[in-house]
Image: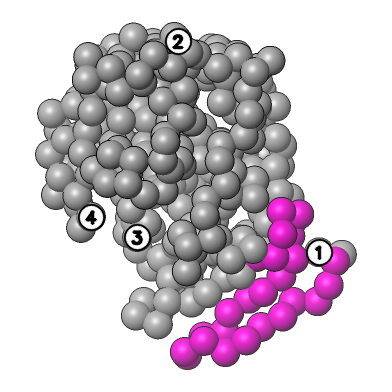
């Protein structure tokens, strides 16, 4: 990788892999309960969880919610065209490949050193039809053909913050251009009290998509703690009833807001433009303890 030799340390029966990447210090920590499962951390912040024996297993709360969106974007098992902005350990791309065989996917991950590490230590299965581009997310999205994608997932963090240029109406114009009619956009957002970033992102999406839903832990929605929320948007009605049922049955039950209640939640927040965009707030240190 040109930066240093790998560092490995014991952790149960397997060894953790510790290696510098472009975005900081990457750690792959083995799961003692699953023989080929790993958690990816960057500078101590959990980024991805992958079980190589069972790619359909989603451990992180927000990834389970994105998994529900993947399940509902098309009839069960039907192949889709998916774009993943932010790669991590390719958890969601692996999930699509496992649950929707013959899907064609593009992963855009700016950190080329991280991509190399993940490909080496957690290799993708052969013939998964996943193409990985080491580009900035917006630059990579611009290379997607008009109307190609059934699904665009944004899960991009730099130093535990979503970059400003991925929070604007101009960014969502690119998302809409890449989506097929009836396609779906889903974004992993992180915020805490007073939820100004989250409210602004809902207002921004509402300026570009007629149909929205938000899935989050009720305590996050009440502004009681910092956490993740999954925003879902489309130009056609969303399967909110089934999404609500699935979110409510998760190990950490989530609540789905949509329609008038979701727009009221914005509290008058205005859409964000490139000119005014800022990165999402940094999580408090206690989040990763």
Q: Secondary structure at mark 2?
A: loop
Q: Measuring 41% from the left and 40% from the top, which residue is drawn there?
A: 193
Nearest-to-viewer mark from 1 and 4: 4
Q: Position of residue 128 (x, y in %)?
A: 48, 47
Picture disc at residue 252 = 4
In this picture, which residue range is highlighted in magenta? 3-26
Assess whether mark 4 and mark 2 are in contact (beta carbons under 8 angstroms): no
Upstream in sequence: badge 4 or badge 3: 3
Q: Is residue 16 magenta?
A: yes
Residue in front for this viewpoint, 13 or 200: 200
Q: Measuring 50% from the left and 34% from the top, which residue is drawn there?
A: 154
Cα gap from disc 3 to disc 2, whole angstroms: 31 Å
Instruction: Tell me if mark 4 has few (under 14), some (14-19) or many (20+) residues whose alpha carbon lies within 10 angstroms of its own.
Output: few
In the displayed structure image, the side of residue 24 where residue 212 appears, left or right: left
Cα gap from disc 4 to disc 3, whole angstroms: 11 Å
Determine the image quadrant of residue 10.
Answer: bottom right
Residue in front for this viewpoint, 44 or 249: 44
Cα gap from disc 2 to disc 4, whole angstroms: 30 Å
Residue picked out by circle 3: 59
């Amino acid at each position: 990788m040109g930066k240093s030799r790998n560092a490995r340390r014991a952790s149960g029966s397997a060894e953790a892999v510790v290696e510098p990447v472009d975005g900081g210090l990457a750690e792959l920590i083995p799961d003692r309960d699953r023989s080929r499962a790993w958690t990816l951390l960057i500078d101590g912040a959990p980024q991805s969880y992958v079980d190589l024996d069972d790619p359909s297993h989603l451990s992180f709360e927000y990834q389970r919610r994105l998994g529900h969106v993947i399940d509902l974007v098309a009839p069960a098992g039907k192949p889709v065209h998916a774009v993943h902005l932010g790669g991590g350990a390719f958890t969601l791309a692996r999930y699509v490949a496992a649950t929707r065989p013959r899907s064609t996917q593009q992963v855009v991950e700016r950190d080329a050193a991280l991509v190399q590490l993940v490909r080496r230590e957690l290799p993708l299965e052969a013939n998964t039809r996943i193409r990985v581009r080491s580009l900035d997310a917006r630059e990579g999205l611009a290379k997607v053909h008009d109307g190609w994608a059934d699904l665009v997932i944004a899960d991009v963090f730099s130093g535990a913050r979503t970059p400003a240029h991925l929070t604007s109406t101009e960014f969502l114009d690119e998302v809409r251009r890449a989506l097929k009619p009836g396609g779906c956009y889903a974004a992993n957002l992180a915020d805490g009290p007073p939820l100004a970033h989250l409210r602004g992102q809902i207002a921004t999406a509402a300026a570009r998509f007629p149909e929205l839903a938000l899935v989050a832990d009720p305590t996050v929605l009440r502004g009681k703690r910092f956490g993740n929320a999954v925003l879902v948007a489309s130009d056609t009605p969303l399967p909110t009833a089934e999404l609500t049922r699935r979110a409510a049955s998760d190990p950490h039950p989530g609540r789905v807001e949509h329609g008038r209640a979701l727009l009221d939640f914005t509290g008058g927040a205005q859409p964000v433009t490139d000119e005014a965009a800022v990165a999402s707030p940094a999580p408090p240190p206690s989040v990763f303890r």
